[in-house]
Each structure stands twice: as C-alpha cells, then as structure tokens.
Image (cartoon, rainbow, N blue to C red):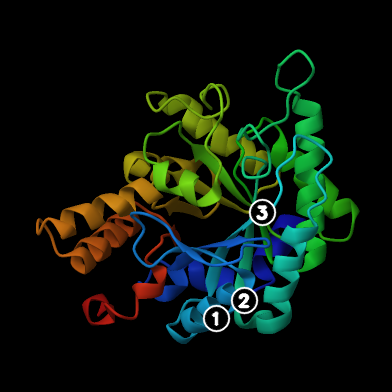
Amino acid sequence: MKRLHRMRATQWLRNMSSQVEFTTSHLVQPLFVVDRLSKSEPIANLRGAQRNTLSDALRVIEADLEQGVRHFLLFAIPHEKSDGGFRRDGETAIISRIKDQFGSALHLWVDTCLCSSTSHGHCGLFDSNGSLDLETTLSELSLAALKFAQAGADGISPSDMMDGRVKAIRQTLDENGFSMVPIMSYSTKFSSQFYGPFRDAAQSAPQFGDRKTYQIDVRNRSDAIASSIRCKDEGADLLMVKPGLTSLDLIGPIASQTGLPVGAYQVSGEYAGLELLAERGALDFELALLETWYVYRRAGATFIITYGARRAREIGVHLQ
C-alpha cells in the first residue's frame, strides 16, 4: 500500500511512465557535483558533461530547467575518501542547496553507493580479513539514504548491487518518516566495459580486483531478471537496467514479471561511442542519439537516464 501511495503522490511519475508520447518527461539528466572542487572540469568523451563545483552546478541546473529538463540523477562526490565512518556533510550540503534554490521545479534523485566515497573504489566495505562485510555495507548505505532524504532528496537510487540493500534502505526510510520517498533501484546492473568515462567522472574505479562478485555476469539472463524481481519484492518503486543498449531484451520481461516501471541507463560508454563516431563523420550525433532513445522506448523503457537529456529540446524538431 505504501508503494502505491508513493507512486500516486507526484505528477512526475505519471508523466514519466506514460508510453503514449515521447517527451522530456521520459528523460533523466545525470549531474556530477564535487564537494569543495575549486573549478569545474570537463569529463572526457561526455559531450556537455562536467564535474561541477556547487556554484557551477546551480547555474547548470537553471539552464537545464530552461531547456525542459525536470528530472536529475545527482552524483554527489565527497571531497575526502574513507573506508568507514562516512560523515556525508558535503554530499548533504549539495542536496540541500539544490533543493533550497529550485524546490519542486525539479525532481532530484540521488545516487546512493559507496564507490565514490571509499579509497578502494568498491561499492561495499571490507572486514579485517579482506572479505566483503555485507552487514556493515547495508548499514552504511541505509544511513546514507536517510541523510540524503533528510537533506531534501526527492528519491533514492541505490546503485551498489549488494544483496538486500533495497530492503534495508526502505526499512530505514519508513522507520524515520520518509515512507513517501521512492526508491529507483539499479536493479539489473551488469559488470560491463561501458562504464569507463563515468568512473573517471566519479573517481570510482576499483583500486584492486573488479566488481564481478556483486555485479551481474553479462551472459546471465536468469540472474538479471531475478535481481529486478528481488528489488521489487524488497520495496523498490522503479527499476532500471544498465547498460541500456546491451539490456534491451530484458526490459519487457522485467516489466511483465514485476509490474513496475522499468527504465534504461544510457551509460557513459554508450554515449561516448556516439560522440566518437560523430567526430569521425560516421553519423549525425543528434539523430543517432534520438534513435537510441526511440529504441529504448520501443523496448518498453518508461524512462531513460542519458547524458543528453539537456539536448532534447535542441533536437525537438525530430521529436514530433
């Protein structure tokens, strides 16, 4: 019942989930804001994307709003990294400042993970024996989600792929008066080669090993679908496949088996690939970008997270 109430609570979800037409309501713009960054920095291979200072981020958001963007996925990146005892002051200050200035003019999802906060770049915490400490990881993720909600986040988006994290976050939010804050889960996230530019942007590349122990093997269809079903059962309100183009075959089955809106993340490597082809004269970037959005929608995606959301109005003539 609480999930149904959350889904009915805001107009943005009804707009985002509409499959009658294609509008900017279906697009979510990622935004990178780095605590205490002295000067904004361009992100290699991601046209128009930056690692922003907070002051620059506010100007970027204002410009994006003027272009019709209403949905943002915030990656708030801390100034200092740690392996436990995270303060989150910098991240919560970023959220508060954005919401204080723009209020309900935007819907602010906040990515909730540990990879950009830890010195080792992994999405979980380790015990003294070097093994993943799931209990401590879930506790830290839940606390982060609570702090983000208290700072004004409109939605929580856990991207870590740890077992049980949606359940832990939902319980913590509900117990602390945030039962109406929805969860958009990275519910089917593959261990992929297409995340490179993002890891530079978030400074989250693993310093040892890889993430194959907690992200899904790209060959495994049954685990991919089961992962999204598990997130639904644990209390997620929206689900997501990542990378988007290499997961097109899963969107329909996940939506059918869960009854929830399922979105696609057009990840940094996919977006950068279009840029590189355009630079070599092999395609028209704007038309190719629009084509991928239509393909996501044709596959059943009810929303698309894309670095090009802020360009939708630019190419609006092609959206008619």
The kind of residue on which mark 3 rests is: Ile
Res 239 visible: yes
Q: Do the residues labelled 1 and 2 touch (CB within 8 Å)?
A: yes
Residue 119 or residue 227, whichever sits in front:
119
Residue denoted by label 2 = 55
* Local secondary structure at mark 2: helix
Residue denoted by label 1 = 59
Give the residue drawn at x 37%, y 24%. 219
The kind of residue on which mark 2 rests is: Ser
The kind of residue on which mark 1 rests is: Arg
Q: Residues within 10 Å of mark 1 (few under 14, many from 20)?
A: few
* Local secondary structure at mark 1: helix
Q: Which of marks 2 and 3 is in front?
A: 2
Depicted 100 relative to depicted 179: above or below: below
Give the residue drawn at x 57%, y 68%. 13
Q: Do the residues labelled 2 and 3 touch (CB within 8 Å)?
A: no
Residue 19 or residue 228, whichever sits in front:
228
In the picture as drawn, the residue positioned furthest to the left comes out as 281
Q: In which quarter of the view is residue 133 placed?
A: top right
In the picture as drawn, the residue positioned furthest to the right comes out as 176
Q: In which quarter of the image is the N terminus?
A: bottom right
Residue denoted by label 3 = 183
Is 282 left or right of 126, judged from the image as shown?
left
Q: How crowded is mark 3: few (under 14 residues within 10 Å), some or many (20 or more)?
A: many
